Amino acid sequence: MTSHLWSRRSSLVEVESETRVVLLDLDDLAHPPRILAGPAAAVWVAADGSRDTEAVCAEVARYFEISAQDIRTDVETFLSDLVAEGLLVGGPA
Amino acid sequence: MSALQDAGERLTQTEAAPLIYVLTTTVAARTETRALAIKGVVLAHHGLRAPRVSGDVDVIVHPDDLDRFLAGMESAGWTANATTTTPKLLEYHSVDLTNDHWPMSIDVHSYFPGFLAPADEVFDRIWARRVEFDQAGHPVPATDLVSSAVVAALHYLRHPGLAHKQAAMETLAELATPLFAPGSQNATDLVAFARDTGCVRPLTPFLERLGLPTTPVHPAEETGYERWRLATTADPRMAWWLEFRALPLRRRPAFLWYALMLEDEELRTYHGDRTVSTPLWRLRVERWKRVSSHLAGATRQKFSGRRQR
């Protein structure tokens, strides 16, 4: 997972506030809008196409002022969830 | 963090509105229909209203495209609420779309009261002037400054007796005055647009306030204005009486029965208590009570008026 640069699907429209991100998938308009809050929103914001898993962990850790090692498993799991939901794609680093 | 979405999180109207505008624009593109954002945030975009979140999103669709657009919205999970068939002083002008996953409804107009020219002609004029504004990073077609000002003014002038509409009209006039100074291009465009869409007479209080000419030219203003005048000055329930009076005698009993009972769906939608559990008979009885109370009040007012004379 570490070799991927994580980026968002191009069909997604997003509205971002300080602690939340709301997503609408234009390829699936009937799907309810997805709400990412707190750490989930932080991971989403970090996965902007310029970061791999290491860098996403580092960015989220920096934001919450905690150790990247402490959140690595959670972040990896969540990145997998986002891929499974078709929201995030992993490209070559 | 592993759960993608906390079930307790609720979408706010501030978050929903821009996404809904993008959604309706996408549906319009995919159904090859013409749809424009009107009112609400569009007015704020043009400086005709203070920025604030509206309770719903309004779009106007070409009358010929309405069914296709609504089918597209239905595919996207939105449901059209039952349209009431009760008599109206002005033609019913929008379809209300709701979706349990979204915190606000969408009003889809194919016609806007106050424009007395044919609806397709009016839409073509509005469409020709359209602009795009940014919502959630996407371009959304919307009414331009001129048509936005006219739509807003007609909206407020539809209920001239309501204090909050008067206040909104006052604010609109204050904000519009520097934008439509007599002799400016905006003012020239506003007058031409009002003439072309047959709304000079309904719009006269607004035009006078801006110091602009109020001479109608569209033939529809001759035929349609009386209905507008009545609708904006009479009690809306007067529509029942007017329709009853216009009916041939043989159709009046069925009309009275309908007036008494209404269709189940419209009773639930327009006279319900936002639940599906209240029995229809109870909603009917509550409505009868309200009607009786209104009739009693109106009768008292009438006799009191006579005594004073």
Image: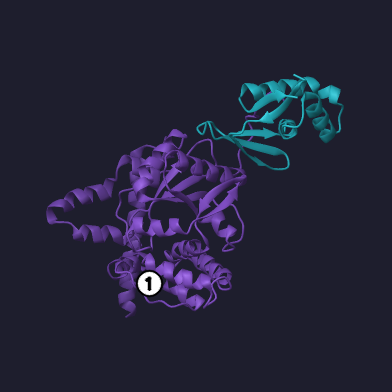
Chain colours: A cyan, B purple
Q: What residue type is disc 1 on?
A: Arg
User: At 27% from the left edge and 49% from the top edge, which residue is drawn?
Assistant: B260
Q: Position of residue B294 (x, y in %)?
A: 35, 59
Q: Is residue B67 rendered to the left or right of residue A28?
A: left
Task: Output the chain of dot 1.
Answer: B
- In the rendered view, tell whether residue B165 sits above or below residue A84: below
- Considering every residue shown, the one lying at the far front of the view is A92
Give whichever of B23, B40 is nearer the camera.
Answer: B23
Give the image quarter of residue B295: bottom left
Element type at marker 1? helix
Give the image quarter of residue B154: bottom left
Q: Position of residue B277 (x, y in %)?
A: 42, 34
- In the rendered view, tell whether residue B244 sits above or below residue B192: above
Does residue B146 appear anywhere in the picture? yes
- Considering every residue shown, the one lying at the far bottom of the view is B309
Give whichever of B228, A77 is nearer the camera.
Answer: A77
Q: Position of residue B96 (x, y in %)?
A: 43, 46
Give whichever of B9, A76 is nearer the camera.
Answer: A76
- Considering every residue shown, the one lying at the far left of the view is B250
- In the rendered view, tell whether residue B255 sits above or below residue B116: above
User: At 43% from the left edge and 67% from the top edge, which residue is drawn?
Assistant: B193
In the rendered image, which quarter contains the N terminus of chain B? Answer: top right
In the rendered image, which quarter contains the C terminus of chain B? Answer: bottom left
Does residue B283 appear anywhere in the picture? no
Q: Are there few (<14), some (14-19), or many (20+) residues within 10 Å of tag 1?
A: many
Mark 1, residue position: B201
User: At 50% from the left edge and 72% from the top edge, which residue is drawn?
Assistant: B187
